[in-house]
Amino acid sequence: MRFNELVGLKATKANLIATWNRGRMPHALLLLGPEGTGGLPLALALAQFILCEDKQAQDACGACANCKKVQRLEHADLHFSFPGITIANKPSLSRNFSKEFRTFVTQSPYGSVLDWLQAISTEKKMGNLSADECREIIEQLNLKSYEGGVKIQIIWMPEYLGKNGNILLKIIEEPPPGTYIILVAEEEAAILPTILSRLQLVRVPALSPNDIAVALQGRGLATGNKALQIGQIANGSFAEALRLVDDFSNDLLPLVKNLFNALFTGNGIGVTRFSEEWAKAGRENISNVLEYTQSLLEGSLRLRYLPQSSANYAPDEADFLTKLAARNLPEHCYTQMIAALTEATRAIRQNANAKSILTAMGIKLIRVIRQLKA
Ligand SMILES: [Zn+2]
């Protein structure tokens, strides 16, 4: 994978490349970012860049022998360790699952560790990075490089090491010459502090709505407003955005506009009609539109303090937000509306009756607006 195939992360990539160019690449680093932001693809891109024999200014060449081997995840000096499950008599060692891992990473580089564990077993077992796995990492890294260049060890989700991480302390502190150890994690608190303190930390930020929209468009998965709206509600996660692609109505903005028109004209019947209309949309779509409405409310609030933030939105969204912001609703009014939406989203997810939840939410929203007029 090349840097230019990643979703967003412009600054993070530029920093890594600059660090390399200054000859300062740490020999043990931790890429830390929430699920779905692309820590693993970033590690792959960095590994390919390090191994590339014809590095370009901003990326690996993608064409040399090393690049091709990394792209197939078959470079002999690029090692992977990841959580595993003991299946039948096959211990959870990464080398026992390398073929499955290659397929998984190729098909879903933004997939989560749960997606991975489900891909190798239908039983709901906890994965682990075992003590034996740690010993294999050490053994592997102490061997000479196969291709005569550097060796790279990627450890995905070191949260699963638990206390076994202690076995790796020494090698992380002082890797053999020409070795890079790249850990990719999501939760800082779940990593042994002794390991953490020996790693150079690189934070992988949540992806911006615009980065997600651009990536969806570039991959032909969604266009126009749909791509932008998914970007708004995917919480910075490309994995979440991919999940949303399939069950997302084409354009949610008209639904939200209708609701707010009814609210501001004090049209009780309109609000009731909205709950009937939305209730038909199916649970996934309802929670999408609720989250989207919430993100628009937050966006409108933000617009007051940061007028330039409207640039993150499609023109018709920006227009809606500007009009909403121009109403100068007090902040507590936003807070109450957002709370009503959050509560409704939670109830919808818990399978409660959609129509009655939406009706109750509509009544709450009307009250918020009425109390202003009173
Ligand atoms: Zn190359």
Image: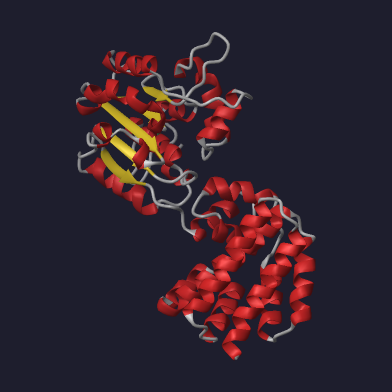
- Total marks placed: 0
Identified at 52% across, 25% down, the residue is 101
Above or below residue 348? Residue 367 is below
Residue at 28%, 42% in the rendered image? 201
Q: Residue at x 46, y 76 (%)?
A: 303
In the displayed structure image, the side of residue 267 where residue 122 appears, left or right: left
Camera-side residue of 218 and 38:
38
Residue furthest to the top: 89
Q: Is 102 left or right of 269, judged from the image as shown? A: left
Front residue of this view, candidates 62 and 136 = 136
Q: Quadrant of residue 158?
A: top left
- In the image, is residue 164 above or below residue 185? above
Picture coordinates of residue 221, whole percent (x, y): 64, 50
Position of residue 50 measured from the top left corner of the image (x, y, whole percent): 32, 33
Q: How is the image coloured?
A: secondary structure
**294 over 135 or under it: above or below:** below
**Does the rendering let one see residue 272?**
yes
User: Residue at horizontal 31%, vertical 44%?
Assistant: 202
Q: Is residue 149 visible?
A: no
**64 horizontally vs 348: left or right:** left
The quarter of the picture where the C terminus appears is bottom right
Would residue 95 appear left or right of 148 to someone viewing this image?
right
As rendered, which of 26 and 237 lies closer to the eye? 237
Q: Position of residue 120 (x, y in %)?
A: 58, 23
Spot occupied by residue 116 in the image (x, y as percentages of width and height): 55, 30
Above or below, 221 against 200 in this view is below
